[in-house]
Amino acid sequence: MSRVWRYVLRTDNGMAPCSEDGMLTLTCCKPIIRRYAKVGEWVVAFEPTALGGKVAYAGQVSAVLPLGDYEKRYRGRRDAVYRAEVLADGQTAFISLLPEYHSEEDSRARDCNGVNGLVFDPFWYWGRNAVEAPGEIADLAYHYVGQSTKNSSPTKIALLDEWLRSTGRPGVHGTPRDPLPMEALERPVENRGCESKRTKARSLVRC
């Protein structure tokens, strides 16, 4: 049975999810969702209750890509921050291409333990313009630590899809609630030989 994954989006800074260039993706944070969500399932994120507990975004998973494959396909995208590298011992490690983001090693390790990046289509991203969920899907609301798939059912998924489409066309309908000063962060870019700043600043994470 398909599921609806829900969680609290405590910080909405444009990285997780990333709504850049008309796409919605999730490659950082929420490792359990990224590891286990399947194509066709839904992810819904709610604001913290202190901010109203409204829906910040919702999307159906259209692609599940290993982090290394995601970085290759979407190189240069803001959240394509983990490049896979096979080490001499045969293990795979990830190079952090944006060490300013999640600068602590344990945070990077949690990101990599999610294994995958998720691409959503269709999706509705409201960000700071979060919207109230209607009563018929109120029991999907989630305001706790972690994530949940409780109350997922074909009927509930149909109601969710119907409501989302009633709000307007899929796409980006707002900006991040807590935007990072991205001009202060070096954007992930394709390495350009041995002089690449990214190569010099890289940080390896074994997973």
Image (tube, grey):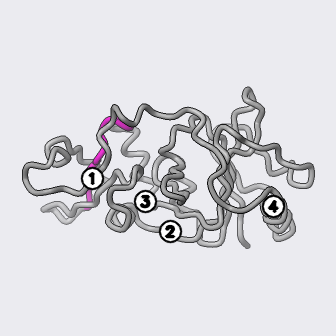
Disc 1 versus disc 2: distance between alpha carbons? 22 Å
User: Which numbered tag is attached to residue 160?
Assistant: 4
Name the amino acid, label 3: Val
Name the element at disc 3.
loop
Front residue of this view, candidates 76 and 48: 76
Closer to the chain start, of discs 2 and 3, is 2
Name the amino acid, label 2: Val
Q: Which residue is mark 2?
A: 64
Name the amino acid, label 1: Val
Name the element at disc 4.
helix
Disc 2 versus disc 3: distance between alpha carbons? 10 Å
Q: Nearer the viewer, mark 1 or mark 3?
A: 1
User: Along the horizontal axis of the image, is 154 left or right of 48?
Assistant: right
User: Which numbered tag is attached to residue 189?
Assistant: 1
Disc 3 versus disc 4: distance between alpha carbons? 27 Å
Name the amino acid, label 4: Leu
Q: Nearer the viewer, mark 1 or mark 4?
A: 1
Question: What residue occupies the far left of the structure in this picture?
Answer: 194
User: What's the magenta region?
Assistant: 92-104
Q: Which residue is mark 3?
A: 115
User: Along the horizontal axis of the image, is 176 left or right of 206?
Assistant: right
